[in-house]
Image (cartoon, rainbow, N blue to C red):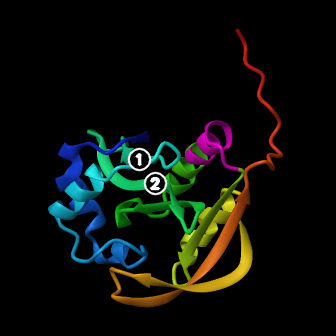
């Protein structure tokens, strides 16, 4: 698996990957249908230095294939982790692996001490990913608009304290 910035030439593959209705309905800001023009706009969208975002590429079937995206964006003044995968990549550990990388980057390279996340209530698989990543449910359910669903839907909120890290530090050999 590779995480890398999106490039303009990724737009057609990005549109094909995220354009599946099963994917779009689990996201809040992605319209359906999702076009190459939408992908062009997303790739060109300016991001702040504390809002990293990446495409996820898989390497298990020959040439690298764009299978998803992950990043941190600001929502109502708070940093928020978001991710999506193509249906072929669901249940294969990519979201957890990519999430661990982005969380470590946030923990060590970004000036934030907390990261929020959420999932639509009808997407419990995303909740399992968030719990594997160390997020804890806040006990709050909110309603968010989903551009892909064209309606509001219930969401379960999570938070991760980036200062909490119970892993044993790994010594580095020289």
Which mark is on residue 70? 2
Per the image, the residue denoted by label 1 is: 54
Pinpoint residue 122: horizontal percent, then vertical percent. Answer: 52, 84
Q: Contact, CB < 8 Å: mark 2 with mark 1?
A: yes
First along the sequence among labels 2 and 1: 1
Horizontal arrangement in the rendering, residue 140 relative to residue 8 (left or right): right
Horizontal arrangement in the rendering, residue 110 relative to residue 56 (left or right): right
For the magenta stretch, what is the residue range? 102-112
Horizontal arrangement in the rendering, residue 47 relative to residue 82 (left or right): left
Q: Residue 135: in sight, yes or no?
A: no
Pinpoint residue 115: horizontal percent, then vertical percent. Answer: 65, 58
Q: Residue at x 34, y 80 (%)?
A: 147
Q: Residue 48: in sight, yes or no?
A: yes
Chief secondary structure of the magenta portion:
helix
Whether the magenta-drawn stretch holds residue 91 is answered as no
Q: Quadrant of residue 39?
A: bottom left
Q: Quadrant of the C terminus?
A: top right
Q: Residue at x 70, y 82 (%)?
A: 140
Horizontal arrangement in the rendering, residue 98 relative to residue 130 (left or right): left
- Residue 63 higher or lower than 14, as above or below: above
């Amino acid at each position: 698996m590779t995480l890398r910035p999106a490039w303009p030439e990724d737009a057609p593959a990005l549109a094909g990957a995220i354009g599946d209705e099963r994917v779009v309905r689990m996201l809040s800001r992605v319209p359906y249908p999702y076009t190459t023009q939408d992908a062009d706009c997303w790739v060109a969208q300016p991001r702040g230095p504390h809002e990293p975002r990446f495409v996820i590429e898989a390497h298990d079937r020959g040439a690298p294939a764009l299978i998803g995206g992950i990043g941190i964006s600001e929502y109502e003044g708070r940093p928020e982790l978001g991710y999506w995968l193509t249906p072929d990549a669901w249940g294969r550990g990519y979201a957890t692996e990519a999430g661990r990388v982005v969380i470590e980057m946030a923990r060590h390279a970004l000036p934030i001490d907390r990261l929020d996340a959420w999932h639509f209530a009808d997407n419990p698989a995303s909740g399992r990913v968030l719990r594997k990543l160390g997020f804890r449910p806040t006990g709050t359910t909110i309603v968010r608009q989903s551009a892909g669903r064209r309606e509001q839907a219930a969401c379960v909120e999570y938070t991760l304290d980036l200062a909490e890290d119970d892993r044993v530090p790994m010594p580095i050999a020289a």
